[in-house]
Amino acid sequence: MKVIRGTLVHCICPESIQVLENYVIGFNEKENGVIVFVEAASKLNDLAAEHGFSIDSVITLTKSQFLMPGLVDTHIHAPQYVNAGTGYDKQLLAWLQDYTFPAEARFQDLQVARDVYPIAVSRSLRHGTTTASYFATIHLEATKELCRTVERLGQRALIGKVNMDRESPDYYVETTQESLEDTKKFIEFVKELNNPLVQAVITPRFSPSCSPELLQGLGDLAREHDLPIQSHVCEQLPEVKYTLSLFLGFQDCSSIFEKHGLLTDKAYMAHCIHLEENEVQLFQQKGVGISHCPNSNLCLCSGLLDTRKMLDLGLKIGLGTDVSGGYSSSVFDALRKSIDVSKALSFGKQDDYRPISHHEALYMATLGGAKVLSLDDKIGNFKAGKELDALLIDVNPPNNTFDTFEWDSFDDVLMKFLYLGDDRNILRRFVAGKELEL
Ligand code: GUN
Ligand code: ZN
């Protein structure tokens, strides 16, 4: 049993955070970090007697420290890390052709995956992402390498072999049969890996790059193996138009996924900015999650997602960095940008329109993301029975990027950290109760 004593900060609903001052959290390091208790510190002696741990072994946080749930990145492209911070002179469809496909095609060479993936995953971990949902590339071997990399570095991850059998350059495309066969092999590989932290996710890139036959095959595989599904939808208006021009007879982009068995309660779609009203209803009915990627949506000029509307409708919504559509692998960056985007959107709305708060953004970065990935039975907040994925935050480390004053309330300090903090404030990272070494 490992026990941490101090302030715990987490979300149990979108609207407000819970700050548990002078609490103790006990977790079983040897059993995937299962949380055994979350109690007021006044009960420490009784808890020590009951669970047989020594009070001397308790990790006690200082006044400037708190424990929060690990961040959840619901959408990131590991191979695109090589392009993060460049290529923003183009919008989506040209950006894919000019920057993204050439970068991803390099991963045909397994050595590129061996070189790049540890750098991309380490950066994500450094920023506090304890769970990430990755798009890899179309290449089976490189995608397996991404699994081995997250396993070695200790991140919790969903990993998808990308599927693309059409509307793609000759140097970066697969046949329908190759795409399905390699996806089956990948599913088997992840099963054999037998690591509870690593899951396979069905990953059609977006519907334009998949034939109807491929989409159907992927829908069948998702059903057969009860797998989650990730893709992109309604990201940019020219992309919506392009999609509908390829799928004649469909009125909207979401129905294409639905028709092929890809809109399940384990599916989550990136962007969703330009969903029609009936598509939003379809997401509600089916329990489909939204991965909101505000950095990418600004960089590629995609648009502003109405997160207020999605939250008020009770849709599952989490944050994604969408590297390298977005330039930062930090979910804290996504959190800040989600608030900025919501405020920018509010300028054109009625006076009573409420932009999202920093509490709602923190919810999306943690429990909201966990719900999107159907992992909220395991992670997202501190509840007995869940597994401990956590960050130990210090709001006053050496070389801090902000200052606090004695009259600051806890919420002031939290807000300063969320707006101004960075990885210097993350002292320790835990995944399934195990501390990571970077
Ligand atoms: N749509 C299809 N592929 C991609 C991608 O790699 N990034 C983003 N942002 N959108 C996409
Ligand atoms: Zn993406």
Image: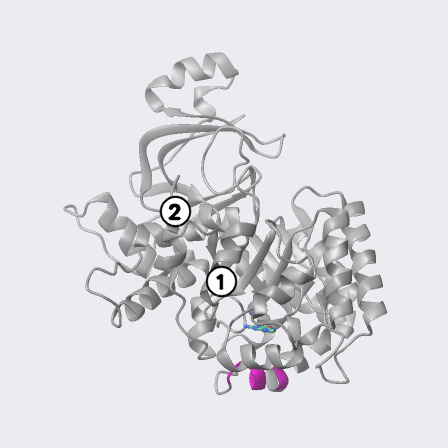
Q: Residues within 10 Å of mark 2 (few under 14, many from 20)?
A: many
| Element marked by disc 1 | helix
* Residue sitting nearer the eye, 108 or 16: 16
Above-or-below relation of 180 to 313: below
Please report the residue visible at 31 percent of the width from the left and 57 percent of the height from the top: 356
Q: Which residue is mark 1?
A: 278
Kindly identify the residue that appears in the image at 72 percent across and 53 percent down.
222
Would you say 399 lies left or right of 155 here?
Answer: left
Q: At numbered mark 2, what does the secondary structure look like: helix, strand or loop?
A: strand
Numbered disc in front, either 2 or 1: 1
For the record, the magenta segment spans 91-97
Counting from the top left corner in percent of width and height, residue 319 is at 46, 58
- In the picture, which quadrant includes the N terminus? top right
Viewer-proximal residue, 23 or 281? 281
Q: Which residue is mark 2?
A: 393
Furthest residue toward left: 407
Q: Is residue 86 visible?
A: no
**Label 2–label 1 contact, CB within 8 A:** no
Quadrant in which residue 33 is drawn: top right
